[in-house]
Amino acid sequence: MEFWIIGSVFVMYFLVMIPVQYSNIVATKKELEESGLTHNDTYEVMSFEQQQLQLNLQGNLFNLPATLMAQYIYFMRHRGNKKVK
């Protein structure tokens, strides 16, 4: 019984985090495109607070399934765009 409760909480968290991760990916790609900097240079220019937010959002192991799904959705929506790297 506990397995189903914990599993359903993880699934709900996963489903809620997909739009959050997707909007983060879109904002990051837009910032990279507007700045003209490389990925590493963009993170060096970021403030400490922004770096920590990115680390917590992307580096959390619980967010990995949502991050992978959001990345897949992003690439499927933008697959004709040659600017996306």
Image (tube, rainbow, N blue to C red):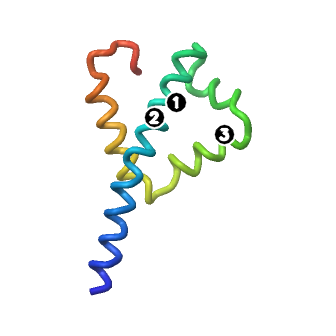
Q: Amino acid at mark 1?
A: Thr
In the rendered image, which quarter is residue 31 located in?
Answer: top right
User: What residue is drawn where x is 41% and y is 21%?
Assistant: 85
Q: Residues within 10 Å of mark 2 (few under 14, many from 20)?
A: some
Write down the residue under mark 3. Answer: 50
Q: Is residue 72 left or right of residue 27?
A: left
Label disc, if present, on residue 1 of the rendered structure:
none
Residue 83 lies, with reference to residue 67, above or below; the image says above
Helix, strand or loop status at disc 1: helix
Look at mark 1 in the image and give the residue it sits on. 28
Distance from Cα at disc 3 to Cα at disc 2: 14 Å
Crowd band around label 1 with a 10 angstrom C-alpha radius: few (<14), some (14–19), many (20+): some
Mark seen at residue 25: 2
- For badge 2, the amino acid type reads Ile
73 vs 16, nearest the viewer: 16
Q: Residue at x 60, y 27 (%)?
A: 40
Numbered-mark total: 3
Compared across the picture, whether 6 is left or right of 60 comes to: left
Q: Residue furthest right?
A: 48
How far across and how far down the image is residue 25, in percent? 45, 34
